[in-house]
Image (tube, helix red, strand yellow):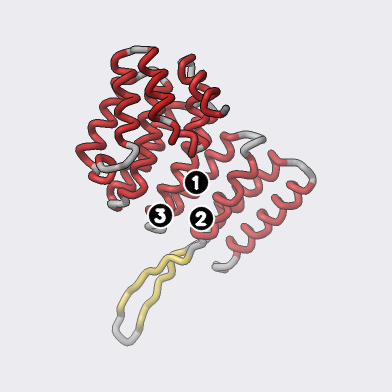
Amino acid sequence: MNIGTPFFAAKSYEQAAQMTQQLKDLPTAAKYFDRAGQLYAEGGIYIYILFLSCFEKRFSFLGYRDSGAILYERCAPQFQQLDRAISIDFYLKAARLAEQEEKAFQAADLYEKAAMQAIRMGNFQQTTELLETVTKILTTMERYDRINRVILYRILLKLFNEDSIAGRNIFDQACQTYPTFDQWEDRDHIELLLEAFDQDDKDLISQRCQVSCRFLLNDKLMCFFFVNCRNLILWQLILNLFV
């Protein structure tokens, strides 16, 4: 078997995808990019090496999964306007390839990017699952410096869906599990917001949003949560903060 064959086939599909992109045929381009990524991922073979001198048997895997992951990640943003489902699919495939290469931090970043697209499609279940996956990976890696933001997303997602109890549970667990979260400068802002929702006090929610949550505007996803929230008070908040 020619080891280079899958690699060159992948290159051919990638070139074909770029040509169809130039012709504005994005659905076909997405299919070709996807096929290229698959060929990169499958482009390795096990080679049996027999050392006659000592009869040592070794196996090595020659593949192009890195190339596949890079391709999927690079192409994912290009199809956001056409179909976010394609972008999500590409980010997920890139993340899985990164996991196979034991690049956990890269995988976590890609799963988070997929979650950002899923929330914009209104797929809250998938967003929740992806953010939970990111949390697990970062926890295993002890990358607590990245967990704070992901926990905040998960809490806001629960508030967005009017489930303040679940948001409170996530907050309490994070405070107990992650020292960096409990010591985070924005922890108190989040807790004040949760307390207002716990009391279901619209005036208090409005007050604490305006006083304590200006930091949320520093993140585009936070703007999305508030602009699209069904809670009128949060909608009024975002309008006030943009003035």
Q: Residue at x 34, y 30 (%)?
A: 190
Mark toward the viewer: 2 or 3: 3
Secondary structure type for disc 2:
helix
Residue position for label 3: 100
Secondary structure type for disc 1:
helix
Say whether disc 2 or disc 3 marks the residue closer to the N-terminus.
2
Q: CA distance from mark 1 to mark 3?
A: 11 Å
Q: CA distance from mark 2 to mark 1?
A: 10 Å
Say whether disc 2 or disc 1 marks the residue closer to the N-terminus.
2
Specify few, some or many for label 3: CA neighbours under 10 Å numbering under 14, 14-19, or 20 or more.
some
Spot the residue most to the bottom. Answer: 53
Can residue 223 be seen here?
yes
Q: Using residue 53 as the reference point, say whether residue 125 is left or right of it.
A: right
Mark toward the viewer: 2 or 1: 1
Name the amino acid type tagged 3. Gln
Name the amino acid type tagged 2. Ala
Vertical placement of residue 101 versus 211, above or below: below
Residue position for label 2: 41
Q: Quadrant of the C terminus?
A: top right
Can residue 227 be seen here?
no
Determine contact: label 2, label 1, CB under 8 Å. Answer: yes
Spot the residue most to the left. Answer: 176
Say whether disc 1 or disc 3 marks the residue closer to the N-terminus.
1
Q: CA distance from mark 2 to mark 3?
A: 10 Å
Given residues 55 and 84, the one toward you in this image is 84
User: What label does residue 93 carry, if any?
Assistant: 1
Vertical placement of residue 36 versus 49, above or below: above
